[in-house]
Image (tube, rainbow, N blue to C red):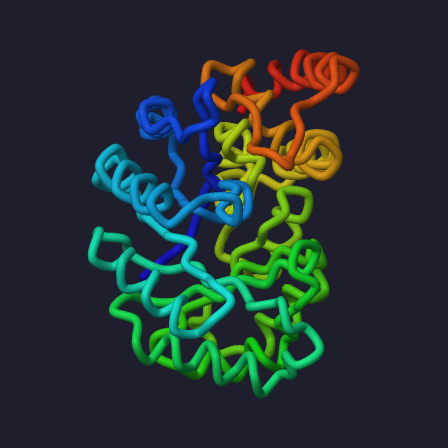
Amino acid sequence: MDLSGVFPALTTPFAADGSVSLADLKHNLHRYNGTDLAGYVVLGSTGESVLLSREETDGILATAKEAAGPEKKLIAGTGAESTAETIERTKRAAELGYHAALVKTPHYYKPMYKPEVLIAHYRRVADNSPIPILLYSVPQFTGVALEPPEAAALSEHPNIIGIKDSSGSVQRVAEVIAAARPDFQVLVGSASTMYPSLMIGARGGILALASALPEKCVALYHFARRGQPEQARELQQLLVKASKVIVSEAGIAGVKFVMDQRGYRGGIPRLPLLPLTDEVKKRLIALLAALEPAVARA
């Protein structure tokens, strides 16, 4: 399976009463279907997956599958703390028609998660998964990183096809690409490092920013692939600022707010995450006003 391209880390919309709004999720996907996004990642970190019930996640998975364009690849976030639960969630995603599973590292028993423990966990999941596995290293949230030697060892498993590396380190991406098998696919999780990562062999990105600014993220990918370095560098510089302010500083609430400004249905995050202050909203509106001409050119 080729995972080249840009995948948005989809947000989860909530209604005024705090429940999941599947209608708003459909609205967003119908709009995304008109872009050149390669597909969608459902129930990742940006989707507030750790704040959802099992019933809610099942509804989100089914709705996203129904609303996604037939040409879009679907990746489900299925990682859980236990190996057995991860396998169960992955099998459920496969039943619903997802093409691959994104499996984050377990992290609660952090001191015990030595390389051999993580390798054994992922191999057991991959052995029992009906669909290909994409490793997910997101140390800023979990405190657990999949190091290049571990990724390389796991790349030898025939059902582990790649990794989403959200470290934000181009050096780490380069080390994984160098150590893993040749067809192992590395996708970055940070829009701010997209272009340099593509230049050293990354296949694409799974980006929170692509939920708010899909056109620009896709344009950067196309500039890089078409050999247009000047345009790519210019756009990458804009993405660095946008990613810092919208994603790193404002978080999921920032991504959702910018979505609201652009005709998508973002809404507010789920508690304990808080909505944005008026001051931050004004800053994001000003940033978006400066970025919109770049979106149009892209």
Place of residue 249 in the rendered image (x, y in percent of width and height, measured from the top left): 75, 34
Place of residue 41 in the rendered image (x, y in percent of width and height, measured from the top left): 42, 46
Q: Which residue lies furthest to the front in this view?
A: 17
Q: Identify which residue is drawn at 30% across, 38% down.
A: 64
Q: Identify which residue is drawn at 22% across, 37% down.
A: 66
Q: Which of 212 and 293 is in front in this view?
A: 212
Q: Which of 79 and 170 is in front in this view?
A: 79
Q: Quadrant of residue 85?
A: bottom left
Mark count: 0
Q: Identify which residue is drawn at 64% across, 37% down.
A: 272
Q: Quadrant of the N terminus?
A: bottom left
Q: Identify which residue is drawn at 44% across, 59% down.
A: 102
Q: Nearer the viewer, residue 200 or 19?
A: 19
Place of residue 47 in the rendered image (x, y in percent of width and height, measured from the top left): 49, 41
263 relative to 232 in the view: left or right: left
- Is 67 rendered above or below residue 114? above
Q: Which of 129 and 5 is in front in this view?
A: 129
Q: Which residue lies furthest to the bottom in this view?
A: 116
Place of residue 197 in the rendered image (x, y in percent of width and height, measured from the top left): 62, 55
